[in-house]
Amino acid sequence: MSAEQTERIRRAAADAHTALQRLTAATAGLTPEGCTVLLEALHDGRTDGLLVVLGGLITATGEDLPEGAAAEDIDEAAAYVEDYAGQRLARARTTLTAQEDQT
């Protein structure tokens, strides 16, 4: 990997970190409705939630690795982020929406 590519990766990761910090700061004092909006941004059940994008990035990281423990761990990590965490967030969003409807 070239030094330029390494620097691009580091800069992009720093930008993503900063954006997530801004998102975290924006969550101060969220109402249940605000939580629902945030959860949808994280995992919308389609293809453009932040967890899906992160899972895709993790998957891409392991695509060119030889078969073995590292590649398997990367695949499992991507699946955990996209599927397991996404399912949990979808359930939480459904629960919050139901609670909002009751009030």
Image: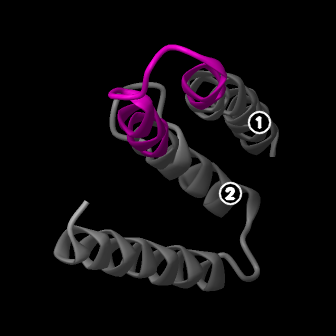
Q: Which mark is residue 6?
A: none
Location of residue 64 in the rendering, given as x and y in whole percent from the top left corner:
33, 28
CA neighbours of label 1 inside 10 A, class few (<14), some (14 to 19), many (20+): some
Residue under numbered circle 2: 35
Residue 55 falls left or right of residue 100:
left
Q: Residue at x 66, y 75 (%)?
A: 27
* Label 1 residue SS: helix
Q: Who is closer to the viewer here, 73 or 48? A: 73
Q: Residue at x 54, y 24 (%)?
A: 71
Location of residue 1 in the rendering, given as x and y in whole percent from the top left corner:
25, 60
Q: Which mark is residue 92?
A: 1
Q: Residue at x 34, y 30 (%)?
A: 47
Residue 86 falls left or right of residue 15:
right
Asked if labels 1 and 2 touch by Cβ distance under 8 angstroms, the answer is yes
Give the image quarter of residue 96: top right
Secondary structure mostly seen in magenta is: helix
Q: Which residues are magenta?
A: 54-74
Please tell me which of labels 2 and 1 falls first in the chain. 2
CA neighbours of label 2 inside 10 A, class few (<14), some (14 to 19), many (20+): some
Q: Who is closer to the viewer here, 61 or 80? A: 61
Location of residue 49 in the rendering, given as x and y in whole percent from the top left corner:
43, 42
